[in-house]
Amino acid sequence: MTPGAFASLAALLLVAPALPGIATKTKSVLTGRRGAPVLQLYYDLWKLVRKGVVYSTTTTWVFRVGPVVVLGSLLVAALFLPLDGRAAPAHFAGDLVAFAAALALGRFALVLAGLDTGSSFEGMGASREVTVATFAEPALFLCFIALVLATGDLSLSGMLGAPLAAAWPHAGASLTLVGISLFVLLLAECSRVPIDDPATHLELTMIHEVIVLDHSGPDLALILYGSALKLALFGALVVEVFVPRAALAAPVAVVVLVAGLGAVAAGVGVVESIMARLRLDRVPQLLVGASALALVGIILLLR
Amino acid sequence: MTTASQIVLLLVVLTDFAVLGTTRMRTCIRAVAVQGFLLGTLPVLLASQLSVHAVGLAVGTVAVKAVALPWFLAWAIREASVRREVEPLVGYIASLLLGAAALALSFAIAAHLPLPALKEPLIVPVSLATLIIGLLVLVTRRKAITQVLGYLMLENGIYLFGLTQTERVPFLLEIGVLLDVFVAVFIMGIVVFHINREFDSLDSARLAELKD
């Protein structure tokens, strides 16, 4: 692993918990409130790590393994992203499928852990989470296909690295569409407002939050950190599509990545302030819309 | 190269999809207004040099398609106080997918059309797509107002196609077409208003009940 790749991965892992904080802060400021501190999630994580764990007697090892698999799979997914804008720590032709598979594995583990509690609320949340994923995953692959067509490279390091900068002049329109589509996917995958409301406290309306109701202590810390990391991963995808950084010096590339992540988080906050949450049966419509955007991008490239 | 006109054409496609995907009538009207504005900027962006012809066409298009007609349709909705939901016959997701299929089809057709070399090759597929999607909206939406919107999009597609020949078609003819559309929509709006007064609904399916 090059120092640049290591530094950018470390930066991503470090700033990830700040992103939900930035989103919440933006939302608070725009709605005229003071809001929680940006670093709130760090405090929460520190608090949770020191606490004990309570396990319901109905749960099995599936429940205990869940949080570890969630975080582990996201860390694996992070290894495939060329966070310094050049090459990822791990890359091979077709690693975009491995990236999507790692994300899917994390979701699978989370959903299983939720189902393992035997609570009907968590079962409902699990079913919703999987429903959203069913529509989000095709959109993700359509985005990847568009990127592959634009850059002619089958690995994430290639399609988000140097070839991407070369593709912008002739495929800018498609890449813009892919970027927008990825941002909608970010909202869906990371359970943000038009799809899910992270601030909700009513189990009936939750999607993501309801699955983790029974987790406590360090387990909950792992899951909360995992959610923040997932936001950072998708944010990094959006940043990398819009700002190819292959030509920048390694330290500058890291700074640009962190700044871009902050901007994406602020964008999420803006969306949360101006939009109401969608009715559950309208969510597929939004995600099919995102797929349609990526599809238009593909058609523009195939022409 | 990605030029300003390409981006505008792309935004036109996005407004097409916005009309297919939104549930609110007012948002649909806004999307069509934005589309009208985008179409208005195109003659200026495509013209090799800034001529009175191009600017006049742009100003006329923006005035009619982006300001007058949307305002009039919004007025018709308000006055007729219809329900604000679109009520499609074909669901939103199916409409979006059909829209994507229409776009693919229009790219395929445009590749085979024996057209002279154009300054902006993207304009033909986008015009065909807007035309087909307009037709789709016209056919699959139940409300009379959304059918007017579909007609407007259909006309926008034709206008886009006309832009490929903008250097050759006389100014008066284009303004004449614009005026035609304006009058047509005006009459449609008034008809819609009267349909609503007679039937207490804008559901065009109920017009089939008209028998002597």
Image (spheres, grey):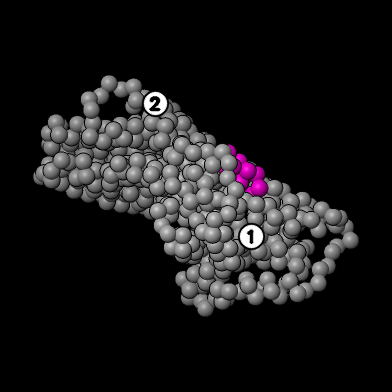
Q: In x, y percent, where is residue A164? A: 43, 45
Q: Secondary structure at mark 1?
A: helix
Q: Quadrant of the C terminus of chain A?
A: top left
Q: Magenta stretch: residue A86 in it?
A: no
- Circle 1 is placed at which residue position? A227
Q: Chain of mark 1?
A: A
Residue B134 percent coordinates (x, y): 38, 35
Q: Magenta part mainly helix, strand or loop?
A: helix
Q: Report the residue marked by disc 2.
A: B108
Q: Secondary structure at mark 2?
A: helix
Identify which residue is drawn at 56% across, 66% down: A15
Q: Which residues fall within the magenta stretch?
A: A94-103
- The residue lying at 75 percent from left, 64 percent from top is A219
Tell me where residue B198 sits by quadrant.
top left
Provide the chain ID for the residue under circle 2.
B
Left or right of B155, for residue A131: right
Tag count in the figure? 2
* Any part of residue B109 in sight: yes
**A117 lies left or right of A84:** right
